[in-house]
Image (cartoon, helix red, strand yellow):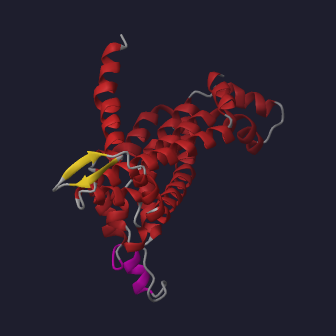
Amino acid sequence: MLLPGGLWMLAFFALPVSLMVSLSLQTGNLVDGFRQTLHWQNYTDGLQTYGDTFARSLWYGLLATVLCVALSYPAAYWIAFHGGRRKTTYLLLLLLPYFVSYILRTVAWKLVLTDNGPVLGPLRGAGLLPDGFRVLDTGLAVVCGLAYNFLPFMALPIYVALERIDARTMEAARDLYASRLQTFLRVVLPLSLPGVFAGVIMTFVPVASDYVNAEVLGGPGDTMIGNVIQSEYFDNGAYPTASALSFTLMAILLLGIFAYARALGTADVLEAARR
């Protein structure tokens, strides 16, 4: 029974990754070709050259992930405990914008955030914004676009975790004279941590690797490492450099995930999930 999935992973994950590992250690160019030289300096050069871009990508990813948690948790909580028989409808409304193309949704944000758009235009006309104030082509626009585009990756795992909580546990907490805040902090939040844990991982990894939002919504100083990798691959034809940057990003994200799991306490999260 494992054979079909194993073959799929071998063909579309293990084999391409192995080829990219080999490519990341090569030297050459598109004209003369590439040859294997075990050139580890591709990694060190990429990290030294684009260290600031790596840091910016991780920072934007962290901000977007925190914003997703802040927006998703209240919505998932309300749907899980107050949605009633219309939970499916509310979930559909939450997911409905994501039936539209990712690129179109990002471009729509660009139209909304323009200086004379439907949001900033009236405020500027009323004199409520200072001269030179803008959102488009800034890091704020990139973070907002990232949070919007990846919101379901956070909301759905949190909703699933909240939906599994037995309402009788909250009733028992109130019977023991716990306030609503105490019930949330001591009962609901710990039991929903598996959803938060999964949502953070599912959101942070693609957000930190994204390049579309920085390309469409950001300015020259808001480039993310995904933009660099895309440019090295398709514009410059520097396949070894792009491969080395990709694996450097993968290693940084894996280290971040392991540190996050250790800080949160994976054993505690799994124990809460079993309950």
Looking at the image, which residue is at 49% across and 48% down?
204
Comparing 97 with 53, the one in front is 53
For the N terminus, which image quadrant? top left
Looking at the image, which residue is at 72% across and 34% down?
187
Comparing 269 with 258, the one in front is 258
User: As drawn, which residue projects farthest toward the right?
Assistant: 177
Comparing 196 with 176, the one in front is 196
* Residue 119 belongs to magenta span: yes
| Location of residue 237 with respect to 161 vertically, above or below | below
Looking at the image, which residue is at 79% across and 42% down?
179
Residue 156 coordinates in the image, percent (x, y): 47, 38
Number of on-image labels: 0
Q: Is residue 240 in sight in this rendering?
A: yes
Residue 51 coordinates in the image, percent (x, y): 49, 62
Looking at the image, which residue is at 62% across and 28% down?
165
Picture quadrant where residue 146 is located: bottom left
* Residue 202 belongs to magenta span: no
| Location of residue 233 with respect to 152 vertically, above or below | below
Q: Is residue 78 in sight in this rendering?
A: no
User: As drawn, which residue projects farthest toward the left?
Assistant: 31
Residue 253 coordinates in the image, percent (x, y): 51, 46
Q: Which residues are magenta?
A: 115-126
Residue 201 coordinates in the image, percent (x, y): 52, 41
For the C terminus, which image quadrant? top right
